[in-house]
Amino acid sequence: MRVNRGKLIGLRRSPYGEEVYDSDLEKYYMVELEGMPGIKSWTKKHNIKIPYQFLFIKRHYIPDFLVEFNDGSKEIHETKGLPFLFLLSTKLKKVSAEEYCKKLGWKYIFITKDKEVFYKNNFLSNALGSIKDIKE
């Protein structure tokens, strides 16, 4: 499977103004986060490591996005494409992340939508003019 990595620059709601993406789904969701109402900031550079166990081996997973809302609430958002949805490791990470968020009073949002869903939101097509995409 080909991974489409790159970087978006000119982001208003990322504290860094730029963020690296690891897939097209992440890239389109980053643009979506820029236009969602009520979001104060979001980032992939959050240093969150969630412990989980896979086949008796202790591991940790780094979720895709930390999202902070204007009211101070926080959520972790994870994007996953169809091929990864059925993996045992994906299910274990999801359960661990839900428990992690519950302890902190946060929400865990699992994003499985295809990029075409994001196109239905006019913000995506309008925002691409101000956001620059740099392919790796």
Image (cartoon, rainbow, N blue to C red):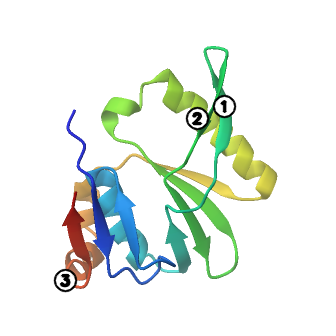
Residue under the image location 71 percent in, 51 percent down? 101
Residue 38: quarter of image: bottom right
Q: Which residue is mark 1?
A: 52
Secondary element at tag 3:
loop
Residue under the image location 30 percent in, 65 percent down? 7
- Whole-angstrom CA distance, mark 2 to mark 3, is 35 Å
Secondary element at tag 1:
strand
Question: Sequence order check: which comes first, mark 1 or mark 2?
Answer: 1
Question: Sequence order check: which comes first, mark 3 or mark 1?
Answer: 1
Question: Sequence order check: which comes first, mark 2 or mark 3?
Answer: 2
Q: Residues within 10 Å of mark 2 (few under 14, many from 20)?
A: many
x and y, in percent, of residue 57 in the image? 65, 19
| Residue 18 relative to residue 75: left or right | left
> Which amino acid type is marked by label 2?
Lys
x and y, in percent, of residue 35 in the image? 39, 78
Q: Are marks 1 and 2 in contact (CB under 8 Å)?
A: yes
> Which amino acid type is marked by label 1?
Tyr
Q: Which residue is mark 3?
A: 129
Depicted 71 relative to depicted 106: above or below:
below
Q: Which residue is mark 2?
A: 93
> Which amino acid type is marked by label 3?
Gly
x and y, in percent, of residue 18 in the image? 38, 74
| Residue 4 relative to residue 56: left or right | left
